[in-house]
Image (cartoon, grey):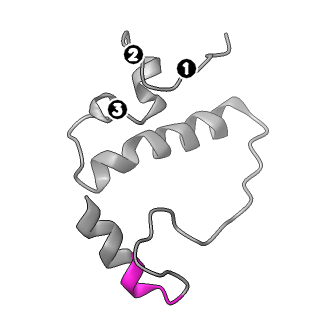
Amino acid sequence: MLWMFERAGKKNPNNITYQFWHQNNQTIVMNDKYTFEQKLKYIHENPVRVGFVDNPVSYPYSSAIDYSEKKGYVKVVLAK
């Protein structure tokens, strides 16, 4: 994965070596459950899209784990 972060870092003159996050920000108002679930699914699918894992639950740093029967590295409290 490090080579991917290095490749992204070289494309952006604001970086010294690596880039992990995209540097463009857009405000998205999540004022309903549908929008929230849509954005959460998008975030959970990112490691799958880039080829890190085959299933979002398999990525150890994702909160997708907490929506399954397993628990991840970071404690996530799910609203009911």
Among the 4 quarters of the image, the one containing residue 8: bottom left
Q: Is residue 52 above or below residue 78?
A: below
Amino acid at pointer 3 = Pro
Q: Position of residue 59 (x, y in %)?
A: 31, 36
Residue 45 lies, with reference to residue 66, above or below; the image says below
First in sequence: mark 3 vs mark 1: 3
Disc 2 residue crowd, few under 14, some 14–19, many 20+, Cα 10 Å: few
Segment tinted magenta in the rendering: 9-13
Q: On the rendered structure, is 30 left or right of 24?
A: right
Give the prevailing secondary structure in the magenta stretch.
Answer: helix
Q: Amino acid at mark 2?
A: Ser
Q: Quadrant of residue 76?
A: top right
Q: Position of residue 27 (x, y in %)?
A: 74, 59
Chain-order first, disc 2 or disc 1:
2
Q: Check disc 2 and report the residue beneath it.
A: 68
Q: Which residue is mark 1?
A: 75
Between residue 68 and residue 34, name the one nearer to us. 68
Q: Nearer the viewer, residue 66 or 16?
A: 16
Query: Residue 65's spot in the image, x, y percent?
Result: 40, 23
Q: What residue is shown with label 3?
A: 60
Q: Earlier in the sequence, mark 3 or mark 2?
A: 3
Secondary structure beneath disc 2? loop
Disc 3 residue crowd, few under 14, some 14–19, many 20+, Cα 10 Å? some
Cβ atoms at labels 3 and 1 below 8 Å apart: no
In front: label 3 or label 2: 3
User: In terms of secondary structure, where does tag 1 sit?
Assistant: loop
Gap between marks 3 and 2, in whole Å? 12 Å
Q: Secondary structure at mark 3?
A: loop
Q: Is residue 12 magenta?
A: yes
Q: CA distance from mark 2 to mark 1?
A: 13 Å
Q: Quadrant of the N terminus?
A: bottom left
